[in-house]
Each structure stands twice: as structure tokens, then as C-alpha cells.
Image: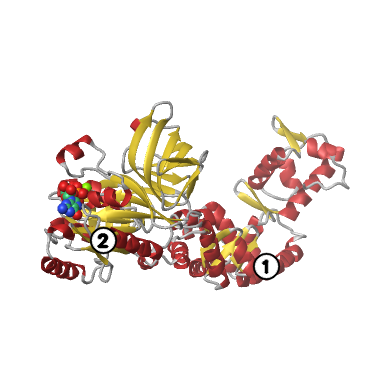
């Protein structure tokens, strides 16, 4: 079964409700006041089986301009419009206005009805038809079937039904496999059941027992029961008019304009980038009414600094939960004149212009080109994304379609998957180049350092922690950079650095091993190794970083020298019980300035224990024999 939603449109009193009654038997004017005044005030609903395969839900809207807000709430979710024009009055203000609104909502299908033909003669009818055809030129209804009918006599109704069936066949069926969404148009309580909401199912399926999110509050609710056209059912599907009995929320907490959504979908924000299609130019900062779904949202439209006129920023006064690609109508706050339409692109980024990526995303959304929507979302995001996040940002699109798009884009090498996360190839390349540039500068400025710390690179590239690790792993795999002594380095640097280090250490081993001196510094090292001062400094720092030179207070001692000193000390303690500073100084042939910090060091590492002015053997020296490693 195919489900479509038909919406009426047209000037007040042109016979919209009478036609629906004649077609379906349902009186859509259910309010007392509507009956008393003979006009529609709020939305009315009916159902019509167009054929064995196509079932239509009908939303009948009021034509009076005072109730335009209700008309807009009903029209936001329809697939097919039925524009009604009374033959006796012809084209009237709301005929034009409703037609414009259908256009801005992006409705693609429709049937035009000239009603009340019983009230006019043929000649008049032809004049009216001419007027109507003129009105429809260059609109989505140009070339649409034009039906002459009378709701009172029933003339032409069979032909109208036939045309509605043909038009309904052309409607692309809403996807019931996509995530569920419904804009709420009515709320009431049924005793013993609780809150019931109704609406047109925009996409997906809601089963009895499903958990859903009520937007904009984000409240979790459960579907307790579902009805479609007055019959209890197990599930309601995209394209149906549906009633849902909800658990976990009271009717008083729900109003028209809220929506029900599959838990993981929908984006909520007060600031949205939008594509605009305006009848009248709108000055930046203008207060407007956005009609989207069944809701009316107050806010302001702002131009971007570099004014590309198709794009503006919409700041709404209450958070708006919606989806990329949603179409809405913009009216001036007061007087409430129609300004045009908008399409939501995405919640805003902290920039004062529309990026090229965002404009491309808008284009893809407008064309409903899922592969490009997915691609532009990934390009636009400056980080890795999970498929779940891509799906949420892509809107209420069938998961499988998004997965297939991700596969296609990988096959085309436009995106890359790193450990189940996705990134656009172009973004990955930019990040790679940024990282290389960063390291090149760093290696040039600080060649003595093995590499740059992960933390600094991550921060400079602005990547989230867990995502950086995945990109870094990719760079390692590709050989872009390597881990050098725990830091990150370009391969060329690492090779040079390691070769140089290796040689340096070997030279040190030879030259410094049997030293006739106790302390060392960069100058001594330079002299011994025959290095220029700058290189000597670098070499000294490397020895320090590798723990081959030990800093003891203000002096530095080569590791092997330190080992020797400890060995000498140990031998000394074989025949002596204690040692003074001056004894150590003499024994090691050094100064008091060095001997003092050395003792501090020995105390700290338990080679010695201080007792008053003397030292005795510490735990380390008592426990170890000469054969054991002393320096550990
Ligand atoms: N003679 C004649 N009268 C009609 C026909 N269709 C509707 N009417 C009358 O026109 C009046 C308005 O009809 P409605 O169906 O309420 O018009 P509507 O377009 O729904 O009006 P709103 O919802 O208030 O915008 C009623 O009195 C109907 O009986 C028709 O084909 N012929
Ligand atoms: Mg009506």
C-alpha cells in the first residue's frame, strides 16, 4: 500500500471543506464555532482510498487569512496539493498566497480544482480558467490537471478523484525505513489512556512499544498505541495520518509545533544556517515568523558579512529541533506578510560567513542527493565522524542509503575510514600537510629534540583526543611520521637524529668513560668531542634527556663517572664505617662544591645515610656486593 497526504489550499469559502465532504463523506469542520460560522478555523482531517494500492490522508486547511498560521501548520507535511478556486469568484488573495506557500514548502505535486461550476455559465467558466492558467504560469502547478467540479451537484467529482489518483502515483513514496518523524498537529487526552497526538508521518515507522523523543524538550516517551484513520493498528508508517497514544508524558506538556522523532535523530539549536528563497529582500536583523512542520517559531534573519544572498543565519527565540533539508515559510513578524521560504542547512558554526562547504551541502540537500549530502557533511566537519553522527546530521534518511553512500565514497577514495570513523580525503590531506609543516619547523628550530609531543600536535590541529590517535595511527602506517623516543617526528628527521645520537653516544662512551674529571657541562663535552658550542649544547641536552648525564643540584655528572664514584665509595666502606665531606672530596679528587651535592644524591638514592656531619653506608651499599649492579 502506498500512503500519501493530500492538502487543500485556496481562498475562504471556495468550497474546500465541501469538496472533501463530497469526496469522502467526512465533515472536516468539526468545531462548534466552525459549524456556526460556516467557515473552517482549524485543520480538518479525512481519509480517502484512491485505489486498492493508494490510500490518501487528507488535511483540510482554513482559507481565511486570519487562520493562515493553521493553514501553514497543515501544509508543512503534505505530498500533494489540491488548490480550490470557486468559479464564481475566481482567483482571490488567498488563492495567490496559498499557491506561493505551497511553492516555498517545496511541494511538487498538485491538482487544480475549479469548484462551484453549478453557479456559473460556460462562458464565465472559460474566463475563470484563463485567469487560473495565467496564475499558474511558472509555478509548480503549471501544466497540472484542471478539474471543473461542483461539490453540491457532484459533477466532475469522479474525474477529480481520477486526477488525484494519477497525481498520487507520481508522488515519491515517503520512506518508512527511514528514521521516524511526525510533527504534532493535535493533542488531546483520552480517559484511561492519557496523551494522544496526531500528525502526518513524515518518515519512518512507529511501532507500539517504541521509544521516541519529543522535541524540542528532548523528553523520552513510549508509544502505547497507534491508530490510523480511526482504526487501531500495530504500527504507523510514513505518509499516513496517524494518532499515537504516548506514555511518559502528559497532554498538557505537548503542543502543536512539537515533533516526535526516532531517538537518535534531529538536531536542536537556536542558530541555523539557512538557504533563503525570498519574494521580498529581507534586511539583516528582521524579526520573522518561521513556519516549519506544524510550528511557528519567532526569530530573526541575519545576512552574512560577505553577503551571498541565498544564505542567511536564522536565530530563533526558542530552540528549534529540526533536520538538515527541512523547508519552511518565512513571514514578517508584523504585519504578517509572506517573505518567502527557507531550507535549513545545519546548526551554525562559529563563523560569520557561509563556507564553500556549507553552500555545497545546501545544494546537495536541495537536490536530495544523499551521496553528496554525506560527502559534504564529512568535508564540512573538521574532524572524524562516526557513521551515527553522519546519519544524524544527514537528517531523516534511510540508514542503509547513508551506509551505501559511505561505501561509494570510500570506493571513490573521496573519504577514508580510520578505525570505523570517517573523514573526507581532502580534510585528511590538509591535516597531514599541517602536521608535516608543523614538524618541519619544529625539527629545524630544535634539531636536538627527538620530536614534538603528541599533545602539542593534537592541540595545534584542533582534533579531539580519541580522533587524533586514529589519525596519528594512520600517519604511522603511511610512514608520514614515526614515534621517536615517545614524541612524533618526520621520518627523515628521525633517521638523521638517530644516526647522530648513536654516534654521539659511541663517542661519549670512548671519550668520557675514563674521565679524569668529576663534573661535566656543555663546554667540557664540546672540548672532549671537538664540537662547536652550538652542537655541544645540543649534544649535552641529548645526554641529559637520555639520562646519560645526571643533574645533581647545580652540577652535572656523567653517568659512568657517577658509577665509578659509587664503586670507589663502596670500596672505601669495606674498611671504614663513615666518611666526611672532605674525605669524599679528597677521594674523588674534586671540590667541596661538588662533594656536597654528591652526598645529597647518595643520600637520596640510599647509597649513604647521613648521621650528623658524617655518612654511613646506605641500604643500597649494604645490600649489594661488588658484582651486583650498583647503579640501578
Ligand atoms: N453552489 C455551490 N456551493 C458550494 C459548492 N461548494 C461549496 N459550496 C458552498 O460554499 C460555502 C463554503 O464552502 P466551504 O466548503 O465551507 O468552503 P471552504 O473553502 O472550506 O471555506 P474555509 O475553509 O472557511 O476557507 C458553503 O456554503 C458551501 O455549501 C459548490 O460546488 N456549489
Ligand atoms: Mg473549509
Q: Colour scheme used in the picture? A: secondary structure
32 over 368 or under it: above or below: above
Crowding at dot 2, Cα within 10 Å, few <14 / some 14-19 / many 20+, comes out as some
Q: Nearer the viewer, mark 1 or mark 2?
A: 2
Which mark is drawn over residue 607? none
Is residue 458 found left or right of 597 in the rendered image? left
Is residue 74 found left or right of 15 in the rendered image? right
Q: Quadrant of residue 109?
A: bottom left
Quick one: SS at disc 1?
Answer: helix
Crowding at dot 1, Cα within 10 Å, few <14 / some 14-19 / many 20+, comes out as some
Q: Quadrant of residue 134?
A: bottom left
Q: Position of residue 594 (x, y in %)?
A: 66, 47
* Residue matched to label 2: 156
Quick one: SS at disc 2?
Answer: loop
Q: Residue at x 49, y 59 (%)?
A: 383
Ligand 1 contact, mark 1 (Cβ < 8 Å):
no
Front-lying residue, 177 or 296: 177
Task: Give how far apart the Cα atoms at labels 1 and 2 are.
Answer: 91 Å
Front-lying residue, 554 or 171: 171
130 over 16 or under it: above or below: below
Task: Of the two numbered discs 1 and 2 on the same chain, state the one appearing first in sequence.
Answer: 2
Which mark is drawn over residue 498? 1
Amino acid at each position: 500500500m502506498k500512503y500519501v497526504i493530500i492538502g487543500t489550499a485556496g481562498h475562504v469559502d471556495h468550497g474546500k471543506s465541501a469538496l472533501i465532504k463530497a469526496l469522502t463523506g467526512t465533515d472536516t469542520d468539526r468545531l462548534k464555532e466552525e459549524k456556526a460560522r460556516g467557515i473552517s478555523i482549524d485543520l480538518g482531517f479525512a481519509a480517502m482510498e484512491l485505489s486498492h494500492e493508494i490510500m490518501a490522508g487528507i488535511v483540510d486547511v482554513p482559507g481565511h487569512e486570519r487562520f493562515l498560521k493553521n493553514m501553514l501548520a497543515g501544509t508543512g507535511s503534505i505530498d500533494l496539493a489540491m488548490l480550490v478556486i470557486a468559479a464564481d469568484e475566481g482567483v482571490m488573495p488567498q488563492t495567490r498566497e496559498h499557491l506561493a506557500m505551497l511553492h516555498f514548502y517545496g511541494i511538487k505535486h498538485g491538482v487544480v480544482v475549479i469548484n462551484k461550476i453549478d453557479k456559473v455559465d460556460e462562458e464565465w467558466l472559460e474566463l475563470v480558467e484563463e485567469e487560473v492558467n495565467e496564475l499558474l504560469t511558472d509555478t509548480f502547478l503549471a501544466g497540472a490537471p484542471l478539474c471543473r467540479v461542483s461539490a453540491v451537484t457532484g459533477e466532475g467529482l469522479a474525474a477529480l478523484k481520477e486526477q488525484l489518483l494519477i497525481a498520487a502515483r507520481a508522488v515519491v513514496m515517503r520512506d518508512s525505513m527511514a528514521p521516524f518523524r511526525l510533527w504534532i498537529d493535535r493533542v488531546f487526552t483520552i480517559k484511561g489512556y492519557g496523551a494522544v497526538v496526531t500528525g502526518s508521518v513524515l518518515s519512518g515507522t512507529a511501532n507500539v512499544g517504541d521509544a521516541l523523543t519529543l522535541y524540542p524538550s528532548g523528553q523520552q516517551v513510549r508509544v502505547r498505541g497507534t491508530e490510523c484513520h480511526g482504526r487501531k493498528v500495530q504500527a504507523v508508517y510514513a505518509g499516513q495520518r496517524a494518532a499515537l497514544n504516548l506514555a511518559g508524558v502528559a497532554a498538557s506538556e505537548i503542543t502543536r509545533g512539537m515533533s516526535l522523532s526516532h531517538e537518535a535523530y534531529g538536531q536542536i539549536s537556536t542558530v541555523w544556517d539557512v538557504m533563503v528563497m525570498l519574494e521580498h529582500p529581507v534586511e539583516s536583523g528582521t524579526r520573522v515568523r518561521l513556519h516549519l512542520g506544524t510550528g511557528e517559531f519567532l526569530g530573526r534573519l541575519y545576512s552574512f558579512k560577505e553577503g551571498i544572498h541565498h544564505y542567511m543565519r536564522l536565530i530563533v527565540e526558542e530552540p528549534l529541533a529540526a533536520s538538515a533539508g527541512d523547508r519552511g515559510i518565512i513571514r514578517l513578524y508584523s504585519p504578517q506578510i509572506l517573505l518567502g521560504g527557507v531550507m535549513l542547512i545545519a546548526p551554525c558554526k562559529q563563523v560569520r560567513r557561509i563556507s564553500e562547504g556549507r553552500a555545497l551541502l545546501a545544494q546537495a540537500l536541495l537536490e536530495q542527493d544523499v551521496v553528496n549530502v554525506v560527502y559534504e557533511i564529512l568535508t564540512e566537519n573538521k574532524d572524524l565522524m562516526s557513521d551515527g553522527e553522519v546519519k544524524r546530521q544527514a537528517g531523516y534518511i534511510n540508514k542503509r542509503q547513508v551506509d551505501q553512500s559511505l561505501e561509494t565514497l570510500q570506493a571513490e577514495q573521496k573519504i577514508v575510514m580510520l578505525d570505523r570513523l570517517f573523514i573526507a580525503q581532502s580534510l585528511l590531506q590538509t591535516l597531514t600537510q599541517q602536521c608535516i609543516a608543523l614538524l618541519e619547523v619544529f625539527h629545524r628550530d630544535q634539531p636536538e629534540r627527538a620530536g614534538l609531543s603528541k599533545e602539542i600536535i593534537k592541540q595545534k590541529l584542533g582534533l579531539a583526543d580519541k580522533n587524533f590517535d586514529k589519525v596519528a595511527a594512520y600517519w604511522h602506517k603511511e610512514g608520514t611520521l614515526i614515534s621517536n623516543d615517545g614524541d612524533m617526528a618526520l621520518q627523515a628527521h628521525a633517521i638523521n637524529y638517530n644516526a647522530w645520537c648513536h654516534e654521539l653516544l659511541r663517542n661519549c662512551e670512548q671519550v668520557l668513560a675514563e674521565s679524569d674529571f668529576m663534573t661535566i657541562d656543555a663546554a667540557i663535552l664540546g672540548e672532549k668531542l671537538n664540537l662547536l658550542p652550538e652542537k655541544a649544547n645540543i649534544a649535552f641536552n641529548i645526554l641529559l634527556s637520555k639520562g646519560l648525564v645526571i643533574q645533581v643540584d647545580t652540577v652535572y655528572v656523567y653517568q659512568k663517572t657517577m658509577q665509578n664514584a659509587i664503586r670507589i665509595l663502596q670500596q672505601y666502606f669495606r674498611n671504614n664505617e663513615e666518611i666526611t665531606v672532605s674525605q669524599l672530596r679528597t677521594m674523588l679528587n674534586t671540590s667541596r662544591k661538588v662533594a656536597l651535592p654528591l652526598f645529597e644524591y647518595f643520600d637520596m638514592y640510599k647509597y649513604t645515610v647521613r648521621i650528623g656531619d658524617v655518612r654511613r653506608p646506605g641500604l643500597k651499599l649494604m645490600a649489594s656486593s661488588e658484582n651486583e649492579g650498583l647503579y640501578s
